[in-house]
Image: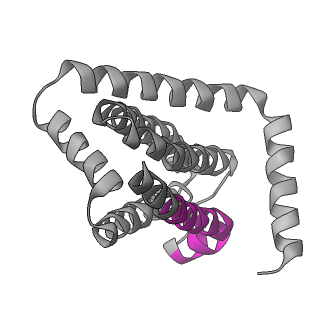
Amino acid sequence: MNMRFIQVFFRDVAHALRRNKAVLLLFAALTICGAVLGTVFFRLWEGGWHCNRLQFARLIACGNFFTFLLRQFCAMLILCALLTVCGTFPSGRFLCCPLCFVLSLYFGAHLSALLAGGVAWVLFVLPLFAELAVNALCCYLAFLRRSCRKGFGESVRDNGDLLLLQCGAFVLTAALTAILRGVSSLL
């Protein structure tokens, strides 16, 4: 991968953002609604999902770092597989809308769990925002791609830039979390 590839990719992304404003507004609305509903569901339900999100926030802030990396890596692989499936058949791109909503729902719950955890945990909101932005961008770009019926391998090749972007988000989230753990331990 060279700088030319990165420049062309981000130029294409900027062009897609300028050209498809209605779809951009749709995904922005899905992202915001999902985050708000995730926050509301976290606050309303004191059941298993509430406790599960609190445990994940505790894992982010002060748990075993390798367990956190493994969970994030598995989530990235699942998301990459779902984005690839979205590109394998013509109407698969419509799966990107509920996928973006569900990712935003979990983001809202994780955000609430981190805010409920204390002052030192608020720092860990930054990696969550970066991850949400990249996930929403990948869903948006996958939605814009029109595809015909093709195999899984062809879809992986066609969506390779999105998969690389997901890998970059994983590395960014891991690096930010490692840095913020050092900062929060000083607090």
| Quadrant of the drawing holding the N terminus | bottom right
Position of residue 40 relative to residue 151, above or below, is: above
Instruction: Tell me where residue 177 appears, x and y as whole percent.
Output: 47, 58
Instruction: Tell me where residue 140 appears, x and y as whole percent.
Output: 63, 43
Query: 82 left or right of 70?
Result: right
- Residue 26 within the magenta-colored segment of the rendering: no
Quadrant hosting residue 109: top left
Instruction: Tell me where residue 137 appears, x and y as whole percent.
Output: 64, 46
Q: What is the number of callouts on the image?
A: 0
Q: Residue furthest front?
A: 186
Is residue 43 among the parts visible in the rendering?
Answer: yes
> What residue is drawn where x is 54% and y is 77%?
153
Is residue 88 among the parts visible in the rendering?
Answer: no
- Residue 162 within the magenta-colored segment of the rendering: yes
> What residue is drawn where x is 18% and y is 44%?
52
Query: Which scheme is used to colour this image of the protein?
Result: one colour
Which stretch is magenta?
Answer: 153-176
Instruction: Tell me where residue 126 appears, x and y as whole percent.
Output: 54, 45
Query: 95 left or right of 134?
Result: left
Position of residue 100 relative to residue 4, above or below, is: above
Please identify the dominant SS of the magenta region. helix
